Amino acid sequence: MSIITKKSEDFLFKYLNNASPVGHELSGQKLWMEYVKPSVDELHVDNYGTAYGVINPGKDYRVVIEGHADEIAWYVNYITEDGFLNVIRNGGSDHLIAPSKRVNIFTPKGVVRGVFGWPAIHTRKGEDAKLTPKLENIFVDVGAKNDKEVEEMGIHVGCVLTFDDSLEKLNDRYYVGRALDNRMGGFCVAEVARLIRKNKVKLPYSLYIVNAVQEEVGLRGAEMITQTIRPDVAIITDVTHDTNTPLVNSKKFGNIKGGKGPTITYSPAVHNKLQDLIIAAANEKKIDFQREASSRSTGTDTDAFAYSNGGVPSALISLPLRYMHTTVEMAHKNDVEGVIKLIYETLRKIEYKHNFKYL
């Protein structure tokens, strides 16, 4: 039986279809907080927009579960005299997929529509046939006749734009859309909170459900919020690569397949005893999972939590994702549920003042 209800899925579609670009996550955070409010005892937002709810507040042992709220985007960087926009990345946006994509440009006057233009195939002959998208040559067309008209639309240097793509279901099996990385993680931790409240689980510690900002530009939201909360334990969820698609080297990136369960990551930042507890929860509850290894760092908010406050026992549970940082990111519904179940069952195994010290 699915643990994701119709109401949950309605929120998921509303949440992911709302833009939440790096540094401008406010509207998405409002939706997330509205959804999580019935499941928590307290709600807070820090100075840069990281939102978090608290269950059982006031205990001197604090556990965090965390996803990140931001999505990759673009900044307007230059406006030409004839009214075209040149852009730079806001996070790891892929310039190769930009041509022919529709975009939403967020201005003080509201959203302005535009497209990433590209020369027609008929015009690319001879040496021009080798033309490929680069950061230096991609551009946005808003249908303006000159830079003055662009300005009148409310567009200025520094405006943020996102691709215009909506969430959908593919074969009633995969969620498909932009920004599943890692707003799906924010959904998962919200669902864990909902299940705790629904099932009247009594936790012997304070649980912080965190939806952090600015992960895509260097784990910045997590870096800030871990100093605020000062947790004793942190379980992070993010996405990882589903490597079972064409053109991906599974020997290099690991043999991870969508539908086979979330992954548990081995890495120096991951605390071995906490990881053992997660694996024990998976085995006891028969939750499918996969294993992967990350050299040096995980590249996720796990690193920010682990290396803060003198060292916080941290672990990473990841959602396999096809086509990361594109507009057609794909996540298997079973894996989404697996992430939720695995975090939920692990939390039930953590005891009050659980000792994760090595000696």
Image (tube, helix red, strand yellow):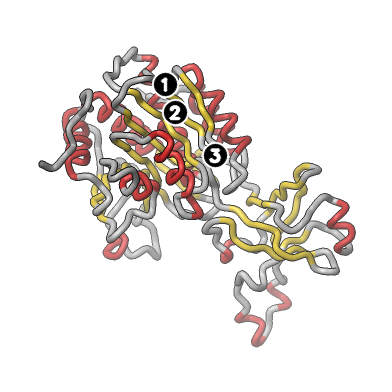
Residue at the disc numbered 2? 190
Q: Quadrant of residue 56?
A: top left
Q: Which residue is mark 3?
A: 168
Of the residues shown, which amino acid type is indicated by label 1?
Answer: Arg
> Would you name the residue on which mark 1 appears?
194
Real-space Cα separation, disc 2 to disc 1, in angstroms: 6 Å
Name the secondary structure under disc 1.
helix
Residue contact between numbered discs 1 and 3, judged by CB atoms under 8 Å: no
Say which mark, if any, is on residue 287. none
Marks 1 and 3, Cα distance to the nearest angstrom?
23 Å
Kind of residue indicated by mark 3: Glu
Please tell me whether mark 2 sits on a helix, a strand or a loop.
helix
Does residue 29 lie above or below 358 as drawn? above
Give the side of residue 56 with respect to residue 74, left or right.
left
Above or below, 299 relative to 347: below
233 with respect to 16 (left or right): left
Q: Give the residue displayed 56% in from the left and 41% down from the top.
A: 48
Secondary structure of the residue carrying numbered label 3: strand
Quadrant where the N terminus lies? top left
User: Where in the figure is residue 168, as x and y percent of width and height?
Assistant: 54, 39
- Give the answer, above or below, for where 351 lies relative to 88: above
- Find the residue positioned furthest to the top: 200
Q: Look at label 2 and name its amino acid.
A: Ala
Q: Residues within 10 Å of mark 2 (few under 14, many from 20)?
A: many
Residue 170 visible in this rendered orientation of the protein: no
Quadrant into which the C terminus falls: top left
Q: Among all residues in the image, which is located at the extreme left?
A: 359
Q: Are marks 2 and 1 in contact (CB under 8 Å)?
A: yes
Badge 1: residue crowd in 10 Å (few <14, some 14–19, many ≥20): some
